[in-house]
Amino acid sequence: MKYWTGAIALLIVAIVAGVAFVLWDEAALSIRTFGWDFWRTSVWDPVAGEFGARPFIWGTLYSSILALLIATPVAIGIAVFLSDWCPHALRTPLVFLTELLAAIPSIVYGLWGIFVLVPAVRELQLALPDWIRAMPLFSGPPVGVSMLSAAVVLAIMIVPFTSSVAREVLKSVPASQREAAYAVGATRWEATVVALHNARTGILGAVMLGFGRALGETMAVTMVIGNNPQAKWSLFAPQYTMSAVIANEFTEAADQLHLDSLVEIGLVLFVITLVVNLASRALVWRLNRARTA
Amino acid sequence: MKNRFSNRTLAAAAAILALSTGLIAQGRIQITGAGATFPNPIYSKWFSEYNKLHPNVEINYQSVGSGAGIRQITNGTVFFGATDGPMTNDQKLAAPGAILHFPTVLGAVVPVFNVSGVTQLKFTGPLLADIFLGKITRWNDAAIAKVNPGVSLPSTEITVAHRSDGSGTTYIWVDYLSKVSPEWKQKVGISTAVNWPVGLGGKGNEGVAGLVKQTPGAIGYVELIYALQNKIAYGPVQNAAGEFVNASLESVTAAAAEASAKMPADFRVSITNAPGKGVYPISSFTWLLLYESPKNKALARTFNEFMTWMLTDGQKFAKDLGYAPLPAAVVKMEMDALKKIKTQ
């Protein structure tokens, strides 16, 4: 039994290494041609054979971080409510409903985005006073398909992941912790804060899980982000992500360099996901050490 | 013990499987192809109709995109390929053998727009190129007003919508823009995916149509069939003879008839901006790709029979599905070209 599980664990490592190798190998032409410039340059021109991934890297990171900023407070709020405050009769239906959000296919989120969210974002932009629309963060023509639409759709998609893990973590905080807080005269709210503090590494893990999901999401994002490769701060500017450009261009890419460049985007996405996961591991580890010290 | 048992069952299962597939496969011919999504509805129709006439011939088509179709026939994973843009010389050289192009039907691409209060708009080639280059940014621009006298144009900003996915539709559109605008040709060029100077990307015809419908002041391009089936307003475009022509099956076939006079022997021809009267300028053939000397001669004989049927009886299915049938002159040339395929 020990050997079996060991072998399966090794298999996982081998699969990850294998994926990295295949991506590296299939992207060989692009890696040779552009080197590190692939990460730095912004032109994506299949006709001229010039490929730079910077706007896509920017779009993926920016949309995911924005989604995280929107989703995290909501998800933690849901988790706290369900674990500490919710009346018993409501809990099961609410848990079911939040988890149902995770079961909706992403193309359905995309359709909802196109028909509901995108027009709403356009109305919002038109309603803003001119002095706000002059700021770089809110500039651009009112088209609706934008970084903001993508971030909101992503946020809704990752809320159930983050909240259900965070809820489990809060549930696993020993009852003695809360009881001790009550014993020294804490209010119910203060006891919740104690529990949150106790569960912070687990909650951080839950947040990073949502971040990983946001980085790789393809279909819903490509339907609402506008697919324009430009790295801009504006929330209302149409932009592009790495997974979206692969999904869009892979089938029709007949030119070898174009194909290899798309695979290299996959490699870049793989590396970034790996770095984000390792960084979150390191953060959890440091938090744990700080607590025991 | 356990091992031997599973081996024996496996062998028995394999024997049964071999026997049954052998029986089913008797006399049945299966041919696979892959490529363009644009002609997929008519190809599916042809393959199912042909199967009714010849129940032993089963042709499977995967509509995976022109680029993937070219890749798959080059690698020899399918018997035939299909593409909306002819293969380049480099792509032909990359294949292990000579590949022939056979036009099957024609399609057209139309400009669609969403300008409040305006139902009819005419376009010229240079006008479309300047809009898609981002040089004309408002609907009441003098260049648009000049082509559309009497239409009251709002000052709305123009939002350009294009395909985000690589597409044969894009190929036809930018091929046309390159012919009518030297600046487009030099700055952007022709491909199934290009570096767009301005605009939003939508996935598929439905993505572009959605963007245009929802964004006031938007202009985009979709396939004629798509605009017809979904009742989207599209404008006539000025042809090389100076007439403003609406896209229709007749005006598209007219473009092909004009082109057939100067048809090159390998059929790799662009018919955008074709000369002549009554011609819709943003039209194109779509092609099947076949090896001149296929490895499997038996499959080649069967497929040649299908090609002959497709070029004659099969053409009558095109109109119902919104494709323009091939002009008679082109059919005749293709019948001759079919004889070049080495089936012995």
Image (cartoon, rainbow, N blue to C red):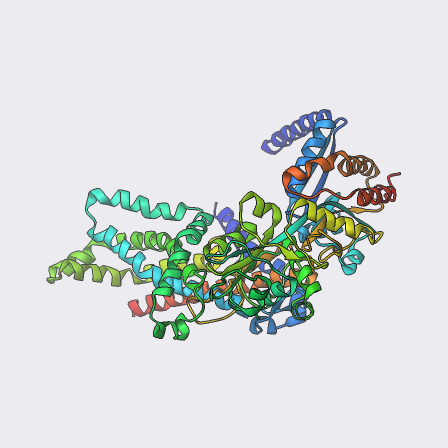
Give the residue furthest to the front: B150
Assign the N terminus of chain B to one quadrant of the image: top right
Question: Can the viewer see residue A218 in this picture?
Answer: no
- Residue at the location (17% across, 60% down)? A189
In front here: A9 or A195? A195
Screen quadrant of the C terminus of chain B: top right
Q: Position of residue A31 (x, y in %)?
A: 64, 68
Residue B138 visible at all: yes
Q: Does residue B205 appear left or right of residue B91 in this picture?
A: left
Q: Give coordinates of residue B119: x percent, y percent.
A: 51, 53
Residue B169, how many percent across, how many down?
63, 53
Residue B55's quadrant in the figure? top right
Total numbered labels? 0
- Name the image quarter holding residue A121: bottom left
Image position of B94 (left or right of A236): right
Image position of B34 with respect to A188: above or below: above
